[in-house]
Image: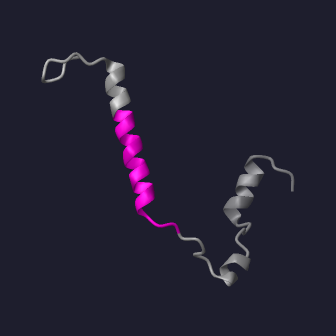
Amino acid sequence: MRSRDGVKMDRRDVLRTLGGAGAAATAAGALSTPAKADSETDNEKRKARYKETDHVKAYYRVNRYPS
């Protein structure tokens, strides 16, 4: 593969360059947003989250989970 200026680039070199650029963009995005340490209130932390609804029961039945 040849680039516009005539320098021969190997396929692996292209992939390394793209991978490095993607990693740098990911790191920059992660560093730019501040992390929220405590977004839930105490009441939200204590509430029950798991509910055994009809579709959950159907999943258990189809996959033969013991009752």
Which corner quadrant of the image does residue 11 belong to? top left
Residue at position x 34%, y 34% from top?
18
Q: Quadrant of the C terminus?
A: bottom right
* 65 displayed left or right of 32: right
Q: Is residue 21 above or below residue 25?
A: above
Let me know if residue 22 is in the magenta part.
yes
Q: Which residues, given as a range, are shown in magenta?
A: 18-35
Rendered location of residue 58, percent (x, y): 71, 56
> Residue 32: in sight, yes or no?
yes
Q: Quadrant of the N terminus?
A: top left
Residue at position x 26%, y 19% from top?
9
Let me know if residue 44 is in the magenta part.
no
> Residue 47: in sight, yes or no?
no
Considering the whole magenta stretch, tell me its main secondary structure. Answer: helix
Which corner quadrant of the image does residue 15 belong to? top left
Q: Is residue 21 above or below residue 41?
A: above
Who is closer to the viewer here, 48 or 64?
A: 48
Who is closer to the viewer here, 31 or 18?
A: 31
Residue at position x 81%, y 50% from top?
65
Rendered location of residue 21, percent (x, y): 34, 39
Rendered location of residue 23, percent (x, y): 41, 42
Q: Is residue 13 above or below residue 57?
A: above
